[in-house]
Amino acid sequence: MLLSKEKLHAFFEVGVAIKAVDSIAEAALGILFLTLTSQTVNKIIFFIFGDELTEQPRDAIWNVLLHGFNGLSASMQSFLAIIFLAHGAVKILLVLGLVKKKLWVYPDATAAFGCFVAYQIYHIIYASSLILELLTALDVLFIWLIIQEYQYQKHILRIEP
């Protein structure tokens, strides 16, 4: 094996920390979509990034930040709010279970994150996105780490299937 169980465990813990931050950010974004208008979201983004947005006119990410929320309908904003809140909440619950080392969560987390990856792949097929492709690859790596950690935790607890 290239990596020891202890190193894989350390990578898993880093992955869980990243997923925790990501989950909280998604839930917060959902709350923002519920409570703020698209114009307000644009003003906040411009306040945070300021002149950086106008200095990078050809950069795809900056263009999305600068123009991405303009013209967003109320129904689309509500839909995005529900998606981000639900996605964030599910991930927060899974991450909490992984942090607490609840063995029953590992298979559920693998399945849930696998469904998220399948949905991301669906989007990649219809609208290629380098960022989404990279995030999907990281999610697949995280799923693999969950499986490795599950085996590690079962070994520590001497639980055999």
Image (cartoon, rainbow, N blue to C red):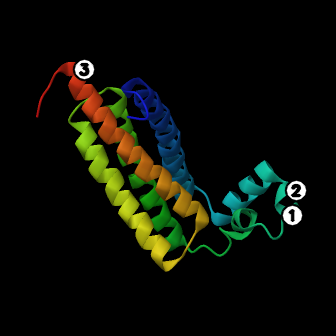
Depth check: give the residue in front, 54 or 11. 11
Return the x and y of residue 43 as percentages of the image width and height: 75, 58
- Residue plotted at (43% across, 34% down): 12
The reply to whether discs 1 and 2 touch (Cβ–Cβ < 8 Å) is: yes
Where does the image place residue 66, in percent across and percent down from the top left? 75, 65
Q: Which mark sits nearer the N-terminus, 3 or 1?
A: 1
Left or right of 47? Residue 27 is left
Q: Position of residue 160 (x, y in %)?
A: 12, 29
Q: Which residue is mark 3?
A: 156
Residue underneath mark 1? 54
Amino acid type at mark 2: Asp
Calculate the distance from the C-alpha at mark 3 to the C-alpha at mark 1.
54 Å
- Give the residue pinned by disc 2: 51
Neighbourhood count class around disc 2 (C-alpha, 10 Å): few under 14, some 14–19, many 20 upward: few
Q: Which SS class for mark 1?
A: helix
Mark 2 vs 3: CB contact within 8 A: no
